[in-house]
Amino acid sequence: MDLNYSDEERAFQAEVRTFLSEKLPKEMSEKVRLGSGLNKADMEQWHGILNDKGWLAQNWPKEFGGAEWDAVQRHIFEEEASLANAPRIVPFGLGMLAPVLQKFGSKEQCDRWLPRILDGSDWWCQGYSEPGAGSDLASLKTKAVRDGDHYIVNGQKTWTTLGQHANMIFCLVRTDPDAKQQEGISFLLIDMDTPGIEVRPIILLDGTAEVNEVWFTDVKVPAENLVGEENKGWTYAKYLLTHERANIAGVGSSNAGLLAVKRMAQTELSGGKPLIENPHFAARIAQVEIDLMAMSLANLRIVSQAAKGGAPGLEASMLKVKGSIIRQEINDLARRAVGTYALPFASEAVEGTNEAPFGPEYAAPLAAQYFNNRKLSIFGGSNEVQRQIIAKTTLGAMR
Amino acid sequence: MNFELTEERQMLQDTLRRFLADKYDVKTRNTILDSESGMSADIWAQLAELGVLGALFGEDDGGFGGAGFDIAVVFEELGRAGVVEPILETCILGGGLVAALGNESQKVLLESVIGGETRLALAHGEPRSRYDLNRVETVFKDGKLSGHKSMVLGAPNADHIVISVRESGEVDSKEGISLFLVPVSELDMRVTPMMGGGMAADIYLDGLALSDDMRLGAAGAAYEHLENMQAAAITAICAQTLGGMENAMALTIEYLKTRKQFGIAIGQFQALQHRMSDMLIEMEQARSAVIGAAGYLEADVRLRDRYASAAKNLMGRAGRLVAEEAVQMHGGIAMTQEYELAHIAKRIIMADHMFGDTDHHLERFIALSAA
């Protein structure tokens, strides 16, 4: 056993650090650090910078223009990028759709769509959840009926993250209403400009508009936009979910968050002394740091296994649960740290205008981030669903 | 021993609950939250009319209540409905101090407070004071004020503000703190809406001249009264949080019964049933904590403060559990601004940032227990 990176991995880490310090625009990392919300142009710019270096499609095979990093390299990048306050890569096209196309799509589909993901011509969003199909995704009702060389799509998707920026959506649709739930689902690529599609923003409790409802009314989709075989979509969806879970523990973001809390606690005062010297607050920080250290090692164990070709099973579910709890605990500490300056509703800070914040500059987004990150234990398969997976895998189908 | 409310308080509770159920629905509240002033003058007038403001003052001050259980009854209902109007700020903070310390001409204000024509606030906290009541760096010297008061709750809608200042002693000395009652038109403030609803302001005091007749109470002797005010404020905010938790609980129970996934109501999953039960158990603890704080509000100071700090600490923990679990069991829908629970959960959590948080009151409880 050796808990350290190999020489090659350390060299890679150094290369990533150099790249970030040279190429990550200062204004961008400041926005991320202060939680002041990135706009579409920011995210596209960061994608462009990574693409120029060949580091945008980190998990893609080289034949498709990817970096073909192994799990350890991806972990190193994620860790360094979080600490450098780099924007996160928008995952829908790069991390979710692309692996499905590469594995199940036709050559024509790969040739057509993958380069457009790389150069930013297309912004993809994910059409999975529906109002009645959340944790129970397979109960989805949006239907697609074959009509000559088209499908006609009707229904509604929801929680569509950054759908307001997207020009393309990949959807799970029901193509066989009579089959068993999982067996009548297909995977369809839909142009958001097609007549009959309406996108409405959902304002979240922190005032942000990052998710949307998407309605489909008699939307005509070319049959060539079906990925793989009809009624096999559930298989592809499950494959995609394993990719959605890469980086699921969010170790990088938790490390960066904890570091920020410690910095704040040196500035904030309690009883006239730095908050970090307050034994109760110090204990709270220590507790979450101990958990995070252990989870980082758990994450590395699984990452290193994956790099050798092993497929994470219930460990991914465990990391999702523990990782979300730790991240949420750090958000909770951060809002506590700033005392009464957590009170303002800082919609300006969230939307990125230039008005000065109340109190210290780091305080403005903290309450909003605390509330926003309640989503971490809800989306991508809620923690309840993950626990069910862990139990079922362990106990078998007990009845 | 008797844990029943008096008939008068039961009537107050019923009246207020019915009024708010009728007049303060989610749509009305969302309109108020979106408005410039962040409050409804119309609702304010009607609450005054109903006697809700008067119930928070003693008979000597023109009210008909003012005891711990009056405060608890009123704020539990306000919390249940997620009311954002600055009643705590006006009646408990500003009003409580004017009632305790005002001279005859200052106390004239209380009549118009109870009548709903005047609103008050208290400017006490500062950027470096966190939750310490004794740390006052704002200085009153040669007839002039200088300092910075932070996150003054209710200031944007107040007519008069009670301001704490240091006249002598070290920055954290309990002696040497005075209060002044200042018309809001004199003040330079920067206004913000708050995450949990309502408005606050930072107030910049740069050489503001005050006359001696604006002083509230004796020079340098305000600390004890700030502690009294804080005990009442804790009772109020804990009761408000309890009301919010009851609402969150009711919404969650209803959702568990009606939301179907995997072909059954999600309340049929035992894992969720047990977590719901834990929430209900903590709710009972919370209810007792509020009764403790209210019941000992008029008791001797040490007993009172032990119960107040115990309540604030317990509500911080139980409130967080109930708010977070209610959101989690609802899933995405509770993350949306227009759903009732979102606002209620935010109010429960943000209450921990007022009058000392969970940790602050844990430490205070330890100190009081050692004394």
Image: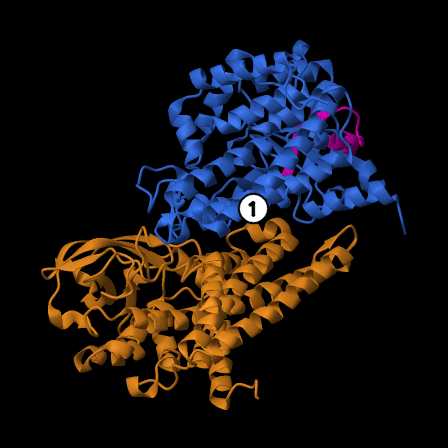
Chain colours: A blue, B orange
For the point 43% across and 38% down, which residue is it? Answer: A263
Is A222 magenta? The answer is: yes
**Which residue is denoted by mark 1 in the rendering?**
A329
* Horizontal arrangement in the rendering, residue B170 relative to residue A184 (left or right): left
The residue lying toward the viewer, choosing from A399 and B176, is: B176
Name which quarter of the figure residue B252 lies in.
bottom right
Instruction: Depth check: give the residue in front, A63 or B364.
Output: B364
Question: Relative to A339, does residue B122 appear above or below in the rendering?
Answer: below
Q: Is residue B164 left or right of residue A22?
A: left
- The residue at 73%/60% (across/down) is B274
**Amino acid type of the residue tagged 1 in the rendering:** Glu
Rendering coords of residue A273 (x, y %)? 37, 48
- Point out residue A95 in the picture as x, y percentages from the top left corner: 63, 25
The location of residue B37, given as percent across then percent down, is: 32, 59
- What residue span does the magenta drawing correspond to? A217-238
Q: Residue sitting at 19 percent across and 66 percent down?
A: B182
